[in-house]
Amino acid sequence: MSDDNSEPTGSEEVDIDETRGFSNLERSDLDDEASSQGLFDDLLSGEPIFENKEVLRPSYTPHELPHRSDQINKMATILVAALRGETPSNILIYGKTGTGKTASAKFVSKELESTSQKYSVPCDVEYINCEVTDTQYRVLAQLANKFIEKNEARIDDRVAELEERLAALDEYAADAEADTATAADGDDADLFGGAETPAIERPETDDGVASTDEMTMTDESSPAHPLDSTPFDSRREVETKIEDLEADKESFEEVPMTGWPTDRVYSVFFDAVDYDERVVVIMLDEIDKLVEKSGDDTLYNLSRMNSELENSRVSIIGISNDLKFTDFLDPRVKSSLGEEEIVFPPYDANQLRDILEHRSNVAFKPGALSDDVIPLCAAFAAQEHGDARRALDLLRTAGELAERSQTETIVEEHVRQAQDKIELDRVVEVVRTLPTQSKLVLFAIILLEKNGVHSINTGEVFNIYKRLCEEIDADVLTQRRVTDLISELDMLGIVNAVVVSKGRYGRTKEISLSVPIDETEAVLLSDSRLSDIDDVQPFVQARFEN
């Protein structure tokens, strides 16, 4: 019998823990785990349809591009000059969206870089998306930083190589010293009848003493000197080269994305490109966006660089959806930039079918597609001017919808649902990126339709638009400018504006929405400025009563 002050036994301690502490926590954790099961488990329980979804995305560059061999071969015949150390001609690539321009250019550039490594010809390809990087400063800064990064990597490789050379020199000197000691022992052994040893030349110094560092074996089997076949004559020269390379690396200064004068950014970019002997291919995708946003100064500077460069050469590949964008270029830029032009025609339905079949073999598990899916996707995309990107989006979205519904096969209905979803996504993206004034005009049209007004005219839109501008303290445009904004919305397919005659009262535009009201309104209200509108219903209603 234990007294009250005695220590509890091990069994008692476990019982206390089980009843008061850990078991309760564990039970609680299990209850939480049980209650949380089902959210993703149900989704994961189905058999996946996709094998590799990434091959259906626009960013994927395939190993083979069907129906683009002519354009690819033409690009290759132009860029092969880079592998000979010559400057390739500048190339302008035209074609509608989804015709394989970017994919083909990336495919050729990847082949160019791999071949240049194979033949040890320095060649760098840099890709810039001008829809994102759309000013001269940003383009030059991004290019400068990329080449600074490449230069630093090459310096690191070169320093590592030279340090290995120094280590080889140390090893060579140690071996020579050891051989000298062995040879000396052999001479002593000969006095007592030892074996013969190779003769060693001992060049004498000014004081007549042989220099150990300069002793060389006359035996033909002696190793080559580590500095043979190099531009260096001594260890000190190697060390000096390493110091110079490290000083170069320290001198590189990364360009900030804002804040520097443009001429300083250009100077840093120029020095970074010209640091090494190489051929540089700069690929400017959506080049028309760059010209539209910041003029042709960037193209002028890039196309004229070769006359000043000493070590490297620069070639430009411009990719554009706009066949007429060169009409706005300076004649000097146009002549130097458009040396070679390659046009990518739209795909037809049969070609789109080949592309989809080629990708679907990798993208989906066997038997995941019904026979009518690919022809339907190709037919829908062929109506959109032969857009392969649209066809791939349709096929991928149809697969995602089928997977969410936990069906094992993609059928025609999934493609039709994907068509509706993509169309809605396109509308949402277009509306989201509209300028504030266009959003206000569209909001006015939505308010009128929601309040039962049909065959809306420009004057009615303008009246509501003015009230909306007052609500958010925005500038009020003239009615003529509002009419122009309505025409732009009509061109984007968001509204339908038809000019009708009112007889002696003149002509007016009758406006109606071409997009879903609720989804479009939700996108507009997600704009921080338009979300400040408290309650537009009263003043709209008041307008009708007036």
Image (cartoon, grey):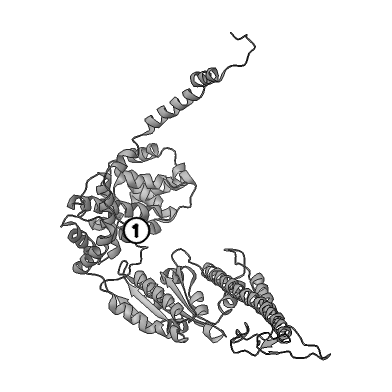
Seen from the viewer's position, the closer of residues 467 and 13 is 13
Where is 455 relative to 23, above or below? below
Quadrant of res 491? bottom left
Residue extending furthest toward the right? 207
- Amino acid carrying label 1: it is Glu
Question: Is residue 77 visible to the viewer in this orientation of the structure?
Answer: yes
Which residue, given by chain and number where applicable, does mark 1 sit on?
A: 54
Quarter of the rendering occupied by the N terminus: top right
Where is 73 relative to 5, above or below? below
Question: Is residue 514 visible to the viewer in this orientation of the structure?
Answer: no
Seen from the viewer's position, the closer of residues 328 and 313 is 313
Quadrant of res 68? bottom left
Quarter of the rendering occupied by the C terminus: top left
Seen from the viewer's position, the closer of residues 15 and 213 is 213
Residue extending furthest toward the left? 371
Determine the residue positioned at 25% across, 44% down. 406
Q: Is residue 129 left or right of residue 11?
A: left
Where is 358 relative to 206, above or below? above
Seen from the viewer's position, the closer of residues 61 and 329 is 61
